């Protein structure tokens, strides 16, 4: 005959065994809750932002999508579907900037423009490249990529490496080649 002690011991063993294995799936669910995916803190569609300073418009930014990652250790804002920006100088002269993708880093005030980057000044100067950085504090464009600079009809120049003021009054390139008047620089 089986003793009551053995039955009780087996019942306790089965109960403990059942509890341990039933908690395993719950424990995995709890672990999944604690794992967070990296996601933006904010998201906006069809963005039209106007930046002003002392009552004057300094820039208008239009983008189909904006992602705000200000919750990251190195905060940034991403424009995965590109941007169109109109920049205004102190005399309200315009420059137009467009790209397929853009990202701006809050800690550095640097904007990284990528893919079909095109800048057009109000007086018709055009810069085209695949990637370009813009320093918002210094109002300065720069890149190490190949660029095409059009200063007017018949004045097309190419360079690898380029930097310029926002209004293209100060232009520097590593090596320029092309056709046109060099005194346009």
Image (spheres, helix red, strand yellow):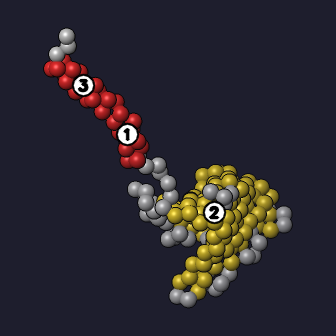
On screen, residue 23 above or below 108 = above
The local crowd at label 3, few if under 14, some if 14 to 19, many if 20 or more residues have their Cα within 10 Å, is few
Q: Could you tell me if the residues under marks 1 and 3 are in contact, i.e. CB atoms within 8 Å?
A: no
Q: Compute the Cα span from label 3 to label 2.
A: 61 Å
On screen, residue 122 above or below 156 = below
> Element type at marker 2?
strand
**Which residue matches tag 2?**
65
Task: Indicate the position of residue 44 as horizontal and vertical percent values.
Answer: 59, 66
Task: Indicate the position of residue 69 as horizontal and vertical percent values.
Answer: 49, 60
The local crowd at label 1, few if under 14, some if 14 to 19, many if 20 or more residues have their Cα within 10 Å, is few
Q: Quadrant of the C terminus?
A: bottom right
Task: Indicate the position of residue 157 as horizontal and vertical percent values.
Answer: 75, 58
Residue positioned most to the bottom: 55
Query: Mark 3 vs mark 2: which is more N-terminal?
Result: 3
Q: Is residue 75 left or right of residue 63?
A: left
The local crowd at label 2, few if under 14, some if 14 to 19, many if 20 or more residues have their Cα within 10 Å, is some
When asked about the image quadrant of residue 71, the answer is: bottom left
**Which residue matches tag 3?**
11
Q: Is residue 11 left or right of residue 31?
A: left
Q: Compute the Cα span from label 1 to label 3.
A: 23 Å
**Which residue matches tag 1?**
26
Q: Could you tell me if the residues under marks 3 and 2 are in contact, i.e. CB atoms within 8 Å?
A: no
Query: Mark 2 vs mark 1: which is more N-terminal?
Result: 1
């Amino acid at each position: 005959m089986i003793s009551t002690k053995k039955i009780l011991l087996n019942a306790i063993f089965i109960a403990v065994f059942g509890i341990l294995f039933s908690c395993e799936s719950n424990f995995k669910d709890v672990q999944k809750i604690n794992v967070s995916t990296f996601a933006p803190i904010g998201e906006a569609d069809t963005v039209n932002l106007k930046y002003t300073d002392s009552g004057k418009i300094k820039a208008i930014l239009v983008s189909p999508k904006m992602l705000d990652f200000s919750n990251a250790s190195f905060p940034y804002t991403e424009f995965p579907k590109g941007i169109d920006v109109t920049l205004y100088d102190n005399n309200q002269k315009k420059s137009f900037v467009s790209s397929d993708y853009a990202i701006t880093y809050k800690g550095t005030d640097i904007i990284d423009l990528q893919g079909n980057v095109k800048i057009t000044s109000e007086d018709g100067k055009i810069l085209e490249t695949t990637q370009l950085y813009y320093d918002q504090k210094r109002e300065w464009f720069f890149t190490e990529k190949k660029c095409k600079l059009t200063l007017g009809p018949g004045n097309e120049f190419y360079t690898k490496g380029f930097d310029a003021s926002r209004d293209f009054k100060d232009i520097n390139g590593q090596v320029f080649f092309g056709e046109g008047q060099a005194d346009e620089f």
